[in-house]
């Protein structure tokens, strides 16, 4: 994974006796797009607010760029761009004025305003008051604002929430281009796996304040195998043979249902069946969608 | 300076938010009342104040200065805070590389400057009104006219600091506004209050010419204390 950009250790946030975030250990490597997943109310936004120094952890520590957030907050925030939940632009100002208001604090050159407007394709509408914008445009302006200070880390909380499919697509493409084109590490939260799996390399899944899964998307996908289904000429006899080999299985709709198997195990089983003169009609892998796994993780608090 | 950056950003953000309109309305409103007061019964008023016409005008204006200061402090503070509250932009602003102390101080300075501009308009407008009322230009009491708006302003500073603190930390502005309006009305009876009550300071700072230093000094000190306490609260607050 290389150098860690964000590392939290046993992060906790308690509101009135109830833990919103509990013992959270996030690890986000440089140049990654990290998908931070969980149902609404699981603690995503609370975590992100802690990462940005907006709220104080009850316990635990946050290291960003290897520095302690409590001690070097301003130095860290100088290299972080953020978009937290729904847009927070100044509706009565134009896009340019919105960016200028932030630019005066960040102290970056004025030319940067035009650059970020063009990155999010808002140049054409830059001189209109933002209150007349669509939600998608407001979100894009939010991302432009986040990019204004040339951040090394972008923290986006539900950036596609409430957008139409076209808006979702635009934002997704924008996020996907960040690591390659701008060398930016991205933390993006969402309650929809389908949205994150198309851009993230690593995912963390949070449930009731606790991180229940943190690994690469491809490892998550590998867990997606839900076993095999065999359709053979004499299922009852074949099942006995399979059980004789030490594998679990059962009859199901005229076929055989087997647990998850490795490739050599599948090959061996098929060979045995053929040796015993079974005709094999089908060998199917039952793949669960990532959405199914996501639901399983969320409901059970882990992968079985 | 971080405060300077935040303040420059704030000046941009309050465009078209009605703050400068309030500043103008408050100060010119007071003058317009006296223009009517003197204009409608000119001969009577001139007769009443013939000993010192300028002093008469200043006294008439002053009777409404404390209430105007309290109302102004309340409304301007609320408007300044609403720029962030209404747009849900605290989280964006406070995730920028700027200390919360600077953000808070910039907004307090903005309120301080806006009220100061209102006082300046009132002073300048008083001179203009006096001249229009044909009081002559020979012995305009410039210093007294400056004191007319700025001494009560210093006496009212604790209320401005309190209003900014409450408005900036509470999303619901009903409490600060109710408090401010109540204080404004109560300030009309300031002459009856003992002088250790802060509500009497805007009044006493101009009227008790013998020792205006007491209410003015107390106003500045109390305002600073309220500002420090408010900033401490703002710095430690969770931003949701």
Image (cartoon, helix red, strand yellow):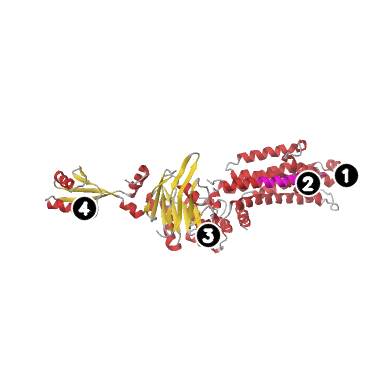
The answer to whether marks 3 and 1 sit on the same chain is no
Give the chain letter at badge 1.
Answer: B
Secondary structure at badge 3 equals loop
The answer to whether marks 2 and 4 sit on the same chain is no
Name the residue at 57% across, 53% down. Answer: A93
Label pair 4/3, CB-CB below 8 angstroms: no
Give the residue pinned by disc 3: A149
Q: Is residue B158 visible?
A: yes
Name the residue at 66% across, 43% down. Answer: B162
Secondary structure at badge 2 equals helix
Q: Which residues are magenta?
A: B210-226
Mark 4 or mark 3, which is nearer to you? 4
In the rendered structure, which disc, 2 or 1, sits on the residue that comes first in sequence? 1
Give the chain letter at badge 2.
Answer: B
Q: Residues within 10 Å of mark 1 (few under 14, many from 20)?
A: few
Give the residue pinned by disc 4: A266
Label pair 3/2, CB-CB below 8 angstroms: no
Task: Using the image as rendered, state which of residue A256 and residue B10 is in the foreground.
Answer: A256
Image quarter in which the N terminus of chain B is found: bottom right
Give the chain letter at badge 4.
Answer: A
Name the residue at 17% across, 52% down. Answer: A270
Q: Residues within 10 Å of mark 3 (few under 14, many from 20)?
A: many
């Amino acid at each position: 994974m290389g150098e860690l950009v964000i590392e939290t250790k046993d992060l906790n946030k308690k509101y009135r006796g109830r833990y919103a975030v509990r013992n959270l250990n996030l690890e986000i490597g440089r140049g990654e797009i990290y998908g931070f997943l969980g149902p609404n109310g699981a603690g995503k936004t609370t975590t992100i607010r802690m990462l940005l120094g907006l709220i104080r952890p009850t316990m635990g520590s946050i290291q960003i760029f290897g520095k302690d957030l409590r001690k070097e907050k301003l130095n860290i925030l100088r290299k972080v761009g953020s978009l937290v939940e729904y847009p927070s632009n100044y509706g009565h100002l134009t896009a340019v004025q919105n960016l200028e208001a932030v630019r005066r604090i960040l102290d970056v050159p004025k030319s940067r305003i035009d650059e970020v407007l063009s990155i999010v394709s808002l140049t054409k509408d830059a001189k209109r008051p933002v209150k007349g914008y669509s939600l998608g445009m407001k979100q894009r302006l939010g991302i432009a604002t986040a990019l204004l200070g040339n951040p090394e880390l972008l923290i986006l909380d539900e950036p596609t929430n409430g957008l139409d499919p076209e808006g979702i697509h635009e934002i997704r493409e924008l996020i996907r281009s960040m690591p390659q084109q701008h060398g930016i590490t991205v933390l993006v939260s969402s309650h929809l796996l389908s949205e994150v799996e198309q851009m993230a390399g690593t995912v963390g899944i949070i449930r009731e304040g606790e991180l229940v899964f943190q690994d690469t998307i491809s490892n998550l996908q590998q867990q997606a195998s839900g076993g095999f289904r065999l359709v053979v000429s004499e299922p009852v006899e074949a099942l006995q043979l399979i059980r004789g080999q030490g594998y679990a299985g059962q009859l199901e709709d005229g076929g055989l249902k087997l647990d998850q198997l490795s490739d050599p195990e599948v090959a061996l089983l098929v060979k045995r069946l053929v040796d015993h003169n079974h005709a094999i009609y089908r060998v199917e892998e039952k793949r669960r969608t990532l959405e199914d796994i996501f639901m399983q993780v969320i409901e059970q608090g882990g992968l079985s | 300076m971080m405060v300077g950056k935040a303040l420059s950003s704030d000046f941009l953000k309050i465009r078209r938010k009605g703050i400068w309109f309030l500043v103008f309305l408050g100060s010119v409103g007071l003058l317009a009342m006296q223009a009517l007061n003197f204009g409608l019964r000119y001969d009577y008023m001139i007769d009443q104040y013939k000993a010192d016409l300028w002093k008469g005008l200043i006294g008439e204006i002053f009777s409404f200065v404390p209430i105007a200061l309290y109302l102004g402090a309340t409304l301007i503070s609320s408007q300044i805070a609403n720029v962030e509250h209404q747009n849900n932009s605290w989280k964006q602003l406070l995730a920028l590389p700027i200390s919360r102390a600077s953000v808070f101080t910039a907004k307090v300075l903005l309120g301080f400057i806006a009220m100061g501009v209102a006082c300046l308009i009132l002073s300048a407008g008083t001179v203009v009104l006096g001249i229009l009322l044909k009081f002559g230009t020979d012995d305009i009491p410039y210093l007294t006219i400056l004191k007319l708006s700025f001494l009560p302003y210093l006496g009212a500073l604790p209320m401005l600091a309190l209003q900014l603190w409450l408005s900036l930390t509470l999303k619901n502005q009903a409490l600060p506004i109710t408090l401010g309006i109540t204080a404004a009305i109560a300030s009309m009876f300031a002459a009856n209050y003992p002088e250790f009550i802060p509500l009497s300071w805007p009044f006493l700072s101009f009227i008790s010419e013998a020792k205006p230093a007491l209410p003015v000094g107390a106003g500045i000190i109390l305002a600073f204390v309220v500002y420090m306490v408010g900033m401490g609260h703002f710095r430690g607050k969770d931003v949701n």
